[in-house]
Image (spheres, rainbow, N blue to C red):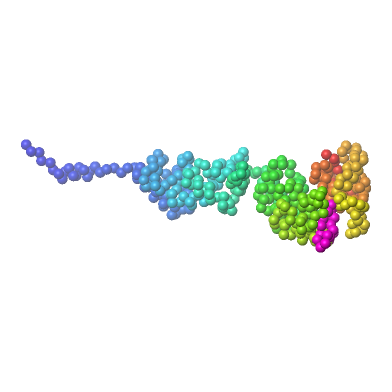
Amino acid sequence: MDIMVDASQAAVKKRRSPKRPDPVSVASNALVETLQTHGSTSSGWLTFLQLVALVPGLTVEVAQAALRKAPAKQQVMLASKLDQNSLVLLKADLESLSRDAGLLKSMVAQGCSAAVPVRTLAELTQSLDKSLKKLVDNYWPTHTQQLPIGLLPVVLISGRKKLFAIHDERFPLPEVELSRKLIDELKRLKTAGEHSYPTRLPALFESTGSSTTQTVRDKSILSEPFCSQAIISFESDPQAVVALVGDEALLADSRSLLSMAFEKIRTDANQVIAVDKIAKCKGLHSAVRPYFQTSIERNIAGNRIPFGLGALKIGKKWSVFRLSDVVGNAPVNKASGNQTVFAPADFVRDFDSAFASLDGKLGLPRYASLVDLRPALSKYPREIFDQELLTLRRSGRYSLSLVEGRFGLTDEERAACLVIDHVPHLLVHRK
């Protein structure tokens, strides 16, 4: 017996059981479409969990699987594969994200702390996808002016390499704090007048009241804002004269700078140095050099050369020498009314001797009063006395004691005080 099969009924059965769509493929398409829509309507970035929440009915597990399936596999990426809540983006937006200040700020917030306030950029980006890391590492070192507020560029030296790093200002660095104080103090000294500014580095550190280590001091002059707002006459010299950027001519006019440049060139075999050679002194900051020779010659003409130095004309050129190198009678300073000029070494010797004779007179060992010291060294004009005493103070041999206000001082004591930053100092202490 033949069995007849209705072909139309079989076809109906096949149509009634169509193939079910793959949920992972559907999710993959949905992720791409959602990111495209978000990108066209918003300037912000989505995290992976935020993206999942925007797709109805989608779970984290399915979304993770969807990222490994077309079309998301070719078009979507996570900024960090190690972070489940990483930013997620279309690969077409990769370069845009690499330049995003928000991404950098979030990495700094996660990577920096009070214990480690500075991180190299390579350390901050180590968890990023390799393609994104490369773009971020290349972009920010050349776009430091675009760093978000609160982040400062720092250059770290590692052997012969310079590494770009970022300082999170939530956690102050001692060298950065000192760098700011140095600039503030330079501005204050400039306002105070010509006798205070420009100044030498040791005096600048001292006037900030900083008691930090030498390491912090060394780092501070290489840190912002000092490194870009100040000029150090001789960068490798810890005694260098320093001024604010824009005051190159004032720095060149400093008598301390002339003394320093002269001593760098002078030798026992060559004790008289021509001004043009001093102006070409090796190591002098290039921004100061164009003004230096003219300033030296102007100061010589105005009899404003440093204490302990003299000048004479050999042919048509001025030359400078130490007064202590001259053999014969002491020279005469005509501008000061035939007053004898002494070399710094004379003052140091005489001051040590006078202090030793007065030590203990006040009932305090290693202390003497300026009321007694000034008369004992009366052959030195007050200006020279004060200048050389400050030099002894900076060298660390002596210190000066502050006198708070003027109450309790006699007229004699008040007249003898050495006033520094509007504060009278009366007692000298030998260290």
Quadrant of the rendering where the N terminus is positioned: top left
In x, y percent, where is residue 53?
42, 44
357 and 322: which is toward the camera:
322
Q: Residue furthest bottom?
A: 316
Which residue sits at x=58%, y=43%? Answer: 119
In x, y percent, where is residue 406?
86, 48
Q: Is residue 321 magenta?
A: yes
How many labels were placed on the picture?
Answer: 0
The magenta-colored residue range is 302-322
Residue 380 appears in the picture as rendered: yes
Which residue sits at x=79%, y=51%? Answer: 266
321 and 241: which is toward the camera:
321
In x, y percent, where is residue 386?
85, 50
Q: Is residue 230 above or below residue 48?
A: below
Quadrant of the rendering where the C terminus is positioned: top right
In x, y percent, where is residue 189?
76, 53
Q: In which quarter of the image is residue 60?
A: top left
Question: Is residue 365 toward the left or the right of residue 185 in the image?
Answer: right
Question: Is residue 345 toward the left or the right of residue 251 in the image?
Answer: right
